[in-house]
Amino acid sequence: MDSTDGRVFEDFVPPHTMVREPATHTLTVDLSAAGAGYRKEHIRVQMVHSHRRLVVRGERPVAGNRWSRFRLELRVPDGCDAKAIHARFENGVVRVTMPGVAPEPVQVETGLSPQAKTAAAPSAAQDQKEAAAAQQQDGDRAARGGGVEDEAEKKDEAAAAAQKQEMRQRPVSSPKDGGHDPDDAQGGGAGEVTAASPPRQGFGFLHDRRRKMATTVLSVVLVLISLGIYVKYSLWP
């Protein structure tokens, strides 16, 4: 029993229990057995963050200068969120709820470990540089190849045009001049001699064939006449 400011306090320790659960801890203080009269305004719940201590206390007048009071001080269990602690008073029972700290989301990384990623980073950068250089070389090669092909096509076209122009300007030889170029007729150089035209060769071939055929027919006729004369004079003397 203690006396302060003319008041006489009767201290007591109310029954209390701590229910420990994986996610939440609950402190229950039963004041119903201490006699009727404790109300919500008679009770204080405080949190001492520096020491992670929970204090539940209360006091109420009994009669005259007599007062009833209690004080509980408990350590907050590890894993509880001290900022989320809340209390309620109902039917003479104080319930203090101490929620657990929400676990931080675990980031699951697939692939290489940090050491492997650190070791592979220079290799990946080198591969990218080599790929870019190869692509640049392919582009330059394609550009150079296109220029060579264009230049070759231009040369071929120029040669064909020159050949056509030369053929237009060059006179065509005829049978009258013996198949020779005008330059050869003048004797000014070693001109190119053209062969006889095909129509002249065909005409000569037909002429010779007709001559041979006429000779053959004449010979056959003579043989038949001689044979007839021979038979006539041989059968009838």
Image (cartoon, grey):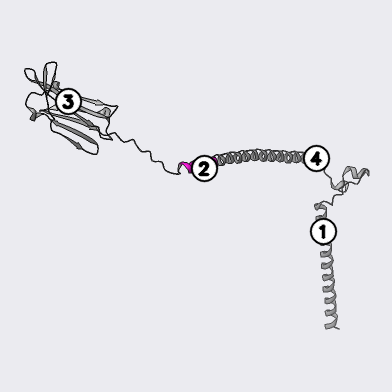
Q: Position of residue 174 (x, y in %)?
A: 84, 46
Q: Position of residue 222 (x, y in %)?
A: 85, 71
**Residue 115: in magenta span:** yes
Kindly identify which residue carries mark 1.
205
Residue 166, numbered circle: 4
Mark 2–mark 1 Cα distance, whole angstroms, equals 94 Å
Is residue 85 visible in the rendered structure shown here?
Answer: no
Contact, CB < 8 Å: mark 4 with mark 1? no
N-terminal of the pair, mark 4 or mark 2, is 2
Towards the viewer: 233 or 8:
8
The answer to whether 202 appears left or right of 4 in the picture is right
- Classify 87 as above or below 117: above
Residue 57, numbered circle: 3
The answer to whether 235 appears left or right of 124 in the picture is right
Q: Which residues are magenta?
A: 114-122
Mark 3–mark 2 Cα distance, whole angstroms, equals 61 Å
N-terminal of the pair, mark 1 or mark 3, is 3
* Mark in front: 2 vs 1: 2
Which quarter of the figure is the C terminus placed in? bottom right
